[in-house]
């Protein structure tokens, strides 16, 4: 039977519940436990797949094709476990399930209500993971902040789980803001007290309180939080801001958070060995030399829209002892008139994924600039597609070459729709999740991965049109990765350039601390070599 840890947030959003939960996961995993993580989001979209990245940040794709919240990326990078579609539920998905059951007569004429029907469904999603696996611990984060109307059914569900399974099997962690008032020079515990009061009114007593503060606070504040919020003093965990999210496991380890958890949940843990994680953190601290990468994207207003790309660059950078600095370039504004100025001194250009027409011409210009000036280039998903369009237009001289996503009437559809896909329905109609790519020997990517086959995750609708393959090859493009079953192009590269590599899949979802995805490492290594 798995033990359950539920994480709630208090006072304000954006305190890093996901990071704290994952950090606890790191400590428990490195104490010999099998850990899984889950996130419940209170919004009504079925999944973030159709949400605007500028609003919601990136969509993280699980290997089984789940389009999930970006926090799952943190979970995977921290606990290094492949999560699944069952790791991410929105209120919308739960309600959609309930309505489906209702339409099929599954509620046998009963009035369908939030309690018990929605709460039962939420509980079933939590128990499902437990039933079908042998995890020691399942950490579930409840998105939003305690007090939000939307999150109430989730809080009620976890209250019931605690009642059904008791305190030895279910633990509540509440992460709340401990603000510092500059004007009076003191920390204020009142918001935490109010937040816990709010939880109590819902029948939830936190077992551990993580006080998120700007900087370290005096011990007596733990006494105060302890006495006002009914938790033992040692269960008040200090978690002050850190210059890297990857240092948080070390921060909470200082307060023995994992041991407190193990004690209450009666979990036998080994001596915690986080040497590998510590080495990674040492790498972060010794990575002092800056390395600039230009990212040409259209969601540049919100860096979270490219979260896994950024983390992958950072992780690969640390591996090479470099600290990544990003120059954001808004593809929508990039034109022939300003490209020289925008990409002046660019050492490496990355064009990430994206959807729709806007910003396409800017991205095509950036790919052309990188190819012609032999600046290391990495194209991801849409980044590969536009690199192909650029090559067709400017090397093969097919001036109207395009993707049918952008110009459905082009005479040269270099990138075209997958057959049999319904384009009208936009939710859940993409090629999603893990597929196997065969790598061509004697290519850059083969050298980088060092394997015949790699499994990477996808999220796209359009593909390279094989009718053009021969022309591309004759002009010097190499198709170095193929999805054999359907003969789809997965990777392209131009061997005459220092590093011009682009892939149809998303390599950013498989980078882990100390294990950067090879395409990112190859890209950065090439920038470094180029500098020397
Ligand atoms: N819009 C492109 C497609 O659907 C690329 C998607 C992406 O970059 N994730 O194929």
Image (cartoon, rainbow, N blue to C red):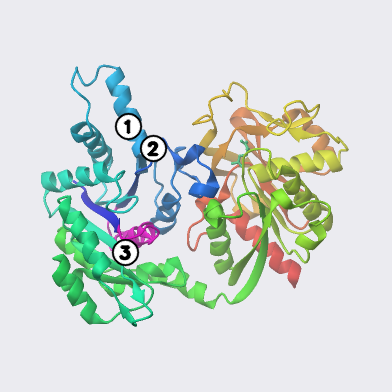
Beta carbon at label 3 within 8 Å of ligand 1: no
Q: Residue visible at 50% across and 50% down?
A: 57
Q: Position of residue 229 (x, y in %)?
A: 17, 66
Report if residue 24 lies within the magenta region.
yes
Tag 2 secondary structure = loop
Instruction: Verify CB contact (< 8 Å) between mark 2 and mark 3.
Output: no
Q: Nearer the viewer, residue 370 or 155?
A: 155
Residue beneath disc 1: 95
Where ligand 1 lies, by image quadrant?
top right
Tag 3 secondary structure = helix
Marks 1 and 2, the one that precedes in the sequence: 2
Q: Nearer the viewer, mark 3 or mark 1?
A: 1
Tag 1 secondary structure = helix
Residue beneath disc 2: 44
Instruction: Give the crowd class for mark 3: few <14, some 14-19, many >=20 residues within 10 Å.
Output: many
Q: Residue visible at 71% across and 43% down?
A: 360
* The C terminus - image quarter: bottom right
Q: Is residue 432 visible?
A: yes
In the image, farthest residue toward the right: 397
Residue 354, by quadrant, is: top right
Instruction: Give the crowd class for mark 1: few <14, some 14-19, many >=20 residues within 10 Å.
Output: some
Q: Nearer the viewer, residue 77 or 230?
A: 230
Q: Position of residue 37 (x, y in %)?
A: 33, 50
Residue beneath disc 3: 27
Instruction: Verify CB contact (< 8 Å) between mark 3 and mark 1.
Output: no
Marks 2 and 3, the one that precedes in the sequence: 3
Q: Position of residue 433 (x, y in %)?
A: 50, 38
Q: Is residue 250 above or below residue 90?
A: below
Query: Residues in magenta?
Result: 10-34
Q: Is residue 258 visible?
A: no
Instruction: Verify CB contact (< 8 Å) between mark 1 and mark 2.
Output: yes
């Amino acid at each position: 039977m798995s033990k359950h840890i539920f994480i709630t947030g208090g006072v304000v959003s954006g305190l890093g519940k996901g990071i704290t939960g994952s950090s606890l996961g790191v400590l428990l995993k490195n104490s010999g436990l099998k850990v899984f993580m889950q996130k419940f989001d209170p919004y009504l979209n079925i999944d973030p797949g159709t949400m605007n990245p500028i609003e919601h940040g990136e969509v993280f794709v699980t290997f089984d094709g789940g389009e999930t919240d970006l926090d799952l990326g943190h979970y995977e990078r921290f606990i290094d476990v492949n999560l699944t579609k069952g790791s991410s539920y929105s209120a919308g998905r739960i309600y959609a399930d309930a309505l489906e059951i209702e339409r099929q007569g599954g509620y046998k004429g009963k009035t369908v209500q939030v309690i018990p029907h929605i709460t039962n469904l939420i509980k079933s999603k939590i128990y499902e993971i437990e039933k079908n696996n042998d995890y020691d611990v399942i950490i579930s984060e409840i998105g939003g902040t305690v007090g939000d109307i939307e999150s109430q059914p989730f809080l009620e569900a976890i209250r019931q789980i605690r009642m059904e399974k008791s305190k030895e099997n279910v633990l509540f962690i509440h992460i709340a803001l401990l603000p510092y008032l500059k004007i009076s020079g003191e920390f204020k515990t009142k918001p935490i007290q109010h937040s816990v009061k709010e939880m109590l009114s819902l029948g939830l007593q936190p077992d551990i309180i993580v006080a998120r503060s700007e900087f370290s606070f005096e011990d007596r504040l733990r006494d105060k939080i302890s006495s006002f919020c009914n938790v033992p003093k040692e269960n008040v965990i200090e978690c002050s801001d850190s210059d890297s999210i990857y240092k948080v496991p070390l921060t909470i380890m200082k307060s023995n958070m994992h041991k407190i958890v193990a004690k209450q949940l009666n979990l036998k843990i080994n001596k915690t060995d986080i040497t590998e994680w510590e080495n990674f953190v040492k790498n972060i601290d010794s990575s002092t030399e800056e390395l600039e990468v230009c990212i040409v994207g259209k969601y540049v207003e919100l860096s979270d829209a490219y979260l896994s790309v950024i983390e992958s660059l950072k992780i690969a950078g640390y591996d090479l002892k470099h600290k990544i600095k990003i120059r954001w370039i808004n593809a929508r504004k990039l034109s022939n008139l300003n490209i020289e100025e925008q990409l002046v001194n660019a050492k490496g250009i990355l064009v990430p994924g994206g959807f729709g027409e806007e910003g396409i011409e800017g991205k095509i210009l950036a790919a052309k600039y990188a190819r012609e000036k032999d600046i290391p280039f990495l194209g991801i998903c849409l980044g590969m597609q536009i690199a192909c369009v650029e090559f067709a237009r400017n090397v093969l001289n097919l001036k109207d070459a395009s993707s049918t996503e952008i110009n459905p009437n082009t005479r040269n559809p270099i990138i075209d729709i997958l057959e049999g896909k319904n384009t009208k329905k936009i939710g859940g109609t993409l090629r999603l999740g893990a597929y196997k790519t065969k790598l061509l020997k004697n290519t850059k990517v083969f050298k980088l991965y060092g394997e015949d086959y790699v499994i990477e995750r996808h999220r796209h609708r359009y593909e390279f049109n094989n009718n053009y393959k021969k022309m591309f090859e004759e002009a010097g493009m190499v198709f170095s990765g193929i999805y054999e079953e359907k003969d789809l192009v997965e990777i392209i590269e131009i061997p005459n350039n220092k590093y011009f590599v682009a892939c149809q899949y998303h390599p950013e979802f498989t980078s882990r601390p100390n294990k950067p995805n090879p395409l990112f490492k190859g890209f950065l290594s090439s920038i470094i070599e180029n500098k020397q």
